[in-house]
Image: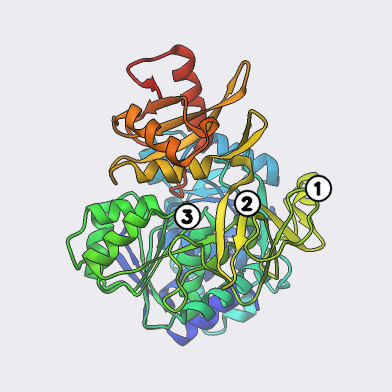
Amino acid sequence: MLLHQMFIETAKKYKDKMAIYDQTTKRDISYEQMLIGTLILKDFIKKFNEKHIGMMIPTSAGSMISVISIMMAGKIPVLINYSTDTIKNSIYAKNRCTFQTIITSKKLLDKLNIQAINGMIFIEDILESLSIVDKITGKIKSFIPSLFIDQSKQHDPAIILFTSGSEKEPKAVPLTHRNILHNINGINDFFQFTEDDIFMSVLPLFHVFGFTTSFWIPISKGCSMVAHANPLDYQQIAENIKKYHATCITATPTFYQGYQKKSSPGDFKSLRVAIAGADRLNPKLVDEYRNRHGVNLYEGYGTTETSPVISTNTAQNNKLGSIGKPLNNLKVKIVDLHTYKELPRNSEGKILVKGENVMNGYLGDIEETSYRVHDDWYDTGDMGILDDDGYLWHKGRLKRFVKIGGEMVSLALVENELQKLLPENNLCCVVEIPHSTKGSEIVAVLTEIADVQYISKELRRKLPSIAIPRHFVYLDSLPCMGSGKINFREVTALCQDVVKNKNISSSSKG
């Protein structure tokens, strides 16, 4: 089965049910209306003589219908990150994937205050150009849609997404229909979603976490989706969780913190599944949701290359601090950093994953593919531990380990210890910057002024001296990607400038 075939089966089965409560257009769209819309737009897209079609539309009925329509037309949607460096990302995607056409939105470009570039077409113009004949044709085709859609193979690419770019240049990741369907099956096996579930679809589709869990998971079960274009619209999303009696949401810890601040006790009591991913989950936030709403936040783990979910905590199996148990339909092992020999339980090493959810390789990058994929095992680049009970514990990105004085220091570990010393509203992260004699030194970034001397003293009780931050930099907020993940490249650049210029108003030595 292909993803768009799965959608058709769902749309036929639940045709009168509301598929999308679109918060952008304030329209409620049934599965039947969604199906007709995809068939109409499919005919328009089929006219383009390109295999890849760019798409840059915030989470909404328009973005969901566009993705499915491109697939139905036998083409591959390339989802572009519009949250930062929109034009740069658009040009990068066009060059990497060799296409010209990008379907986007006038409202989005107006909001971002940017001009369209060559090849961009607007969803608003497409909709206005549709004739009554187009609409009638779409309605007729909806009775036997399978006759009018592309019949690819499960192992053909379904979508091209890009890695976050939080640490280095993004890589293009083609994911097949089989990759995503396999991940959907594994997630459904853990959480037993049903057609009665109502999803808060708040994550952007250009991020794989949102693409699979906020879009295709609910479609696979005929669920309703409350679609929000901006995950940072904390007030409205908090209100809509209560208004629509939402039962499921996937988001990042940053977003959960925002929704919590805009809620009243009990507002989220309808939620039965709330999964956090893409960044570490603060135990304080877990306590807040449990105490104020009676809701458990479950931390999960995944990567773009694995479609994305690798492991997650659930109501039945939950260890706070872990990233849960691996899905039943994939394999995870921990290997030695240098020899790749599999390590016994409770040993720290690199996390490798194997299964039908793993990508075939990066687009146009054989070298990086060969570095990451060995005998069908994907090297996540993350350090972790599998404990005796089968729970996976994330110990940090390998790239977020820094060698100082000949020893390896985990920046994630420093962050964890630092956050314990701060109030919940003072967010933090830790980065390394170059040093002329030591090679590197550690900088802590805080969002509010703190007692640096006290913090440094307490950190020395937990960490070796080489792991203590040498500078503290204050920012109004931590720069984030559109997914909510911290943009470490931007943070590092800001810290380098601050330390270099010795901006005493923004930094002080620890």
In the image, is 288 to the left or to the right of 356? left
Q: How far separated are the C-alphas under marks 3 and 2?
A: 43 Å
Image quarter of residue 176:
bottom right
Q: Nearer the viewer, residue 257 or 321?
A: 321
- Disc 1 marks which residue? 366
Residue 359 position within the rendered picture, expressed as x and y whole percent measured from the top left: 70, 60
Name the kind of residue labelled 3 in the image: Ile
Residue 382 is labelled as: 2
- At horizontal 53% and vertical 74% (from top left) the residue drawn is 187
- Disc 3 marks which residue? 126
Q: How far separated are the C-alphas under marks 1 and 2?
A: 21 Å
Foreground disc of the pair 1, 3 = 1
Q: Is residue 207 visible?
A: yes
Residue 416 sits above or below residue 302 on the image: above
Residue 374 sits above or below residue 397 on the image: below
Foreground disc of the pair 1, 2 = 2
How many neighbours does mark 3 have within 10 angstroms: few (below 14), some (14-19), or many (20 or more)? few
Name the kind of residue labelled 1 in the image: Ile
